[in-house]
Amino acid sequence: PRTPNEAGLIEVDLKRKVEYQNSHLRQLINPQKCFRMLQLLKAKGNPHYQFYDDYNVYTERCKLQDFKGYTIVFDEEVELIADISEKNKSEESETSNECIEELLENDY
């Protein structure tokens, strides 16, 4: 079985009122399904869901304003960014090592 992180699930506590300390219901939800439902409600003309951010705008806003939360919810994209930056760093270090070796050969 997949772990919640692999499945793309996040834990949400639902309360009857914000003031209450205990949660009424604790669930694992899939954010992708929530966004699909929001798109459907907006497309059908529901007046309560006409002013939400679409998925792309939401991901960019999370990335800029709450990177820690972004890494939790959108873990795959962060791993891709990390892979690309690691490749660039390794290419730069190889190039600098070659330059240093050339300088040493020329000097000696």
Image (cartoon, rainbow, N blue to C red):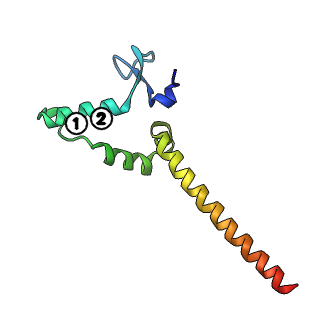
Indicate the secondary structure of the residue bearing disc 2.
helix
Indicate the secondary structure of the residue bearing disc 1.
helix
Q: Residue at x 74, y 70 (%)?
A: 97
Q: Is residue 56 found left or right of 5 in the rendered image?
A: left
Q: Is residue 44 above or below residue 77?
A: above
- Residue 4 image offset from top left, x and y in percent: 49, 26
Q: Which residue is mark 2?
A: 35
Q: Residue at x 81, y 85 (%)?
A: 106
Marks 2/1 in contact by CB < 8 Å: the verdict is yes
Residue 99: quarter of image: bottom right
Q: Quadrant of the C terminus?
A: bottom right
Q: Looking at this view, is 31 or 17 the one in front? A: 31
Residue 17: quarter of image: top left
Q: Which residue is mark 1?
A: 39
Q: CA distance from mark 2 to mark 1?
A: 6 Å
Q: Looking at this view, is 22 or 104 the one in front? A: 104
Q: Amino acid at mark 2?
A: Phe
